[in-house]
Amino acid sequence: MRRKIIIGISFFGILSTIIVIGILSIIQPATPKDVSSDHSPTPIITATHVPSNTPTQFPTNTSTPTTTPTSTHTPTLSTRIAQASIIMPDVTLLPTSTALPNDVQILAAPPQPIEPLPNATRLPAPYTDFINWVTFESDHPALHYIGGDWTPIGSQQASRGQYHFSEAPNAMLQFPFSGEAIRLRYVGFTNGGICEVVLNGDVVMPIDSYSSTGLFAVTEVFYLGAGEHLLEVRNANEANPNSSGNMIAIDAIDVYQADELTLILPNGELPSPSATPTLIPVEQIELIQAPPSPQPTATAIPPRVIDASVIVGYDENLNQVLDVSEGIRGISVRLVEVGTNNVLAHAFTDAQGFAQLQATSHAEVQLVVPYFGQAWALTGSRESQTFTLLLSAGNQPGLIP
C-alpha cells in the first residue's frame, strides 16, 4: 500500500515538470540551432523598426460632410387640363416718356396754307390719305348737303371755278373729316345772310356773308387736334340789315393733317404721360382636356293637387234644388286616373250627402260616382271644386242603398 502511493506521487511530479517546461518553451523566444563545424552559420533576416528623429507630415484627404439632396414627392395632377399664361386686363402700366426724334418740327399752330393747295378729288375714300393742307371742293362727295336746296354756280374767281349756294332757311352742310385743322371758303354778296360754323357740336363763329360786291373769302384756321371731326354750316335765317336776302354760299373747305415729323403744341408744352389700363389678350393657351359638357336633364313636372267635393241628393219636393234634408248617405265617391282607372282617393257621403276627396297626380283625373254612372273631369287648381248630383224624383228612394 505504501508503494502505490509513492508511485502515484512520482508520476504526478513528472507530469507537472513536463507542463512547466512546455509553458516556458512557449514564452521564451527560440534560439538558432548549432550547426556542425563543417558549415558556416546562415544569418536570419528580421525586420527591425527604426524610429526617425523628426516626424514627417504627409498630406491626407479629409472628407467634408455635404448635404445630400433627397427626392421629395410633389403632388401633381394625373391629367393636365389646361396650361395658360394670363395677364390681368386691368393692370395699369407706369407712364413712360418717349424721346422725340432729333429732326421733329414743333409748331405752336398749324402752318398757314400756301396757294395753290392740292385738290382732294383724287383721294380714295375715306379721304384720309393726305399730308399738310388739302382742298375739298364744294362738289366733293364728302360734303353732304342735308338741308335746303343747293345750287352749283360757275365762277372764274371760285376755287376750281365753282361754288354752291342756298337761300333756304333750313340750309345745312355736313362734312366729316380726319385732320388737325380746318378753314372754310365762302362767298359774300349783296343778298348774303348769316350762317354758323359748328365744329364737333360747338358753334365756333358766325359768318356774315353780306358784301356790296362779289367777295370770295376764307375764315380763320381752327385747330382741333388729330382725329375724326365733324364740320357743320347752318343757315341762321338772319341777315345783315343792308342785305337783300339770307343766302349762304360755300366755295371749298381746306383741311390740314401734319406729317410724322411735325408736332403741333398750341400751349408750347409736351403732353405728360399718364398711366392707363392696358388690355393684353391671353396668349399661349394649350387645351389638353376639357371637362365634359353638361348634358341636358329633364326637369320633373310636379304633380298637381286635386281637391274635390260632391253632394248627392234626392229631389224629393221636385223644386230642382238640393235641400238640406235631401242628402243621401253612404254613396261611394272616387277620384280615378283617366286611362289607368287607378283609384287615387275613395270616400262615402255622410248624412247630408257630402263627401270630400283630395289627391295628387300627373295624369288627368275624374271624380266618379260609380253607383249612378256619373263622372266629372277635374282641373289642377288647388281650390276645392264642388259638384252636385241631384237625382230625379222618378227614382225610387228604396232602390238607393
Image: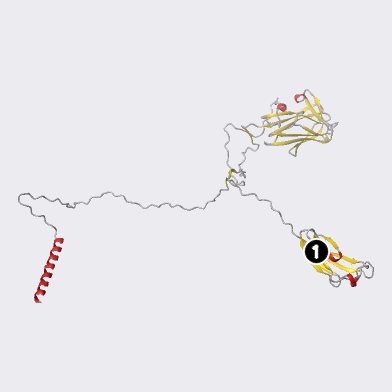
Return the residue nearer the eye: 391 or 191. 391
**Residue 168 against residue 295 in the figure, above or below:** above
Return the residue nearer the eye: 26 or 78. 26
> Left or right: 254 with respect to 292?
right
Q: Position of residue 248 (x, y in %)?
A: 81, 31
Q: Which residue is mark 1?
A: 335
Picture quadrant of residue 215: top right
Q: Name the residue type under label 1.
A: Leu
Q: Position of residue 330 (x, y in %)?
A: 84, 71
Q: Position of residue 373 (x, y in %)?
A: 86, 63
Picture quadrant of residue 148: top right
Q: Is residue 221 visible?
A: no
Which corner quadrant holds the C terminus? Answer: bottom right
Return the residue nearer the eye: 225 or 381. 381
Q: Position of residue 30 (x, y in %)?
A: 13, 57
Return the residue nearer the eye: 74 or 284. 74
**Residue 290 against residue 107 in the figure, above or below:** below
Residue at image coords 72%, 27% = 121
Q: Residue furthest right?
A: 318
Residue at disc 1, secondary structure: strand
> Left or right: 154 with respect to 263?
right
Q: Residue furthest left?
A: 37
Q: Residue furthest top?
A: 156
Residue at image coords 14%, 63% = 22
> Left or right: 334 with respect to 108?
right
Q: Is residue 389 visible?
A: yes
